[in-house]
């Protein structure tokens, strides 16, 4: 009489160690491996989080984020924009502010344009 695998009830018992069929025994080994690896990954993640939650790491992450947020332009320059052209544009706006200061006109729009050029220089074109 053929004995069926108690795990699936479909195949013949062929694995003497487990008392299951080959497919069920293989699946069981894989399940155990995945469980062990998952536990190990969870432990690595827990330790990593512990290290990265330190006050010093948090301070540096926040500093980097503030710096990143400060230099983001309203729009990224195109891939073929010359950084020297952007710098030249910023210098032209500075020249206009100098002239505006002498004439007593409002140079606010030129200041905004300079800030945008500098942000674009800091980030470069989109990848």
Image: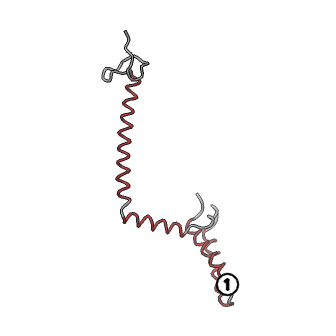
Q: Secondary structure at mark 1?
A: loop
Q: Can residue 100 be seen at all in this image of the molecule?
A: yes
Q: Quadrant of residue 104?
A: bottom right
In the picture as drawn, the residue positioned furthest to the top comes out as 1
Looking at the image, residue 7 sits to the left or right of residue 68; the answer is: left
Residue at the image position 35 percent from the left and 39 percent from the top: 36
**Label 1 Cα neighbours within 10 Å, binned few <14 / some 14-19 / many ≥20:** few
User: Picture coordinates of residue 105 (x, y %)?
Assistant: 69, 87
Query: Eyeballing the image, is 96 above or below 47?
Result: below
Query: Eyeballing the image, is 51 above or below 59?
Result: above
**Quadrant in the picture for the N terminus:** top left
User: Viewer-proximal residue, 82 or 122?
Assistant: 122
User: Viewer-proximal residue, 6 or 79?
Assistant: 6
In the picture as drawn, the residue positioned furthest to the left comes out as 17
User: Picture coordinates of residue 122 (x, y %)?
Assistant: 55, 68
User: Picture coordinates of residue 97 (x, y %)?
Assistant: 65, 83
Residue at the image position 39 percent from the left and 32 percent from the top: 30
Residue at the image position 35 percent from the left and 56 percent from the top: 50
Report the label total: 1
**Quadrant in the picture for the C terminus:** bottom right
User: Viewer-proximal residue, 65 or 116?
Assistant: 65
User: Picture coordinates of residue 11 (x, y %)?
Assistant: 42, 18
Q: Quadrant of residue 108?
A: bottom right
Q: Quadrant of residue 112?
A: bottom right
Q: Can residue 92 be seen at all in this image of the molecule?
A: no
Tell me, what colour scheme is on the image?
A: secondary structure
Query: Eyeballing the image, is 109 above or below 27?
Result: below
Q: Which residue is mark 1?
A: 106
Residue at the image position 62 percent from the left and 71 percent from the top: 86
User: Viewer-proximal residue, 68 or 90?
Assistant: 68
């Amino acid at each position: 009489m053929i004995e069926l695998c108690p795990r699936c009830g479909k195949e013949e018992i062929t694995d003497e160690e487990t008392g299951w069929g080959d497919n069920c025994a293989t699946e069981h080994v894989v399940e155990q491996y995945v469980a062990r690896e998952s536990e190990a990954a969870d432990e690595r993640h827990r330790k990593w989080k512990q290290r990265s939650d330190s006050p010093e790491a948090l301070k540096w992450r926040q500093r980097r984020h503030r710096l990143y947020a400060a230099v983001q332009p309203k729009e990224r320059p195109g891939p073929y924009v010359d950084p020297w052209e952007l710098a030249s544009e910023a210098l032209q706006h500075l020249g206009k502010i100098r002239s505006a200061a002498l004439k007593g006109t409002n140079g606010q729009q030129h200041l905004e344009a300079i800030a945008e050029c500098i942000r674009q220089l800091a980030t470069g074109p989109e990848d």
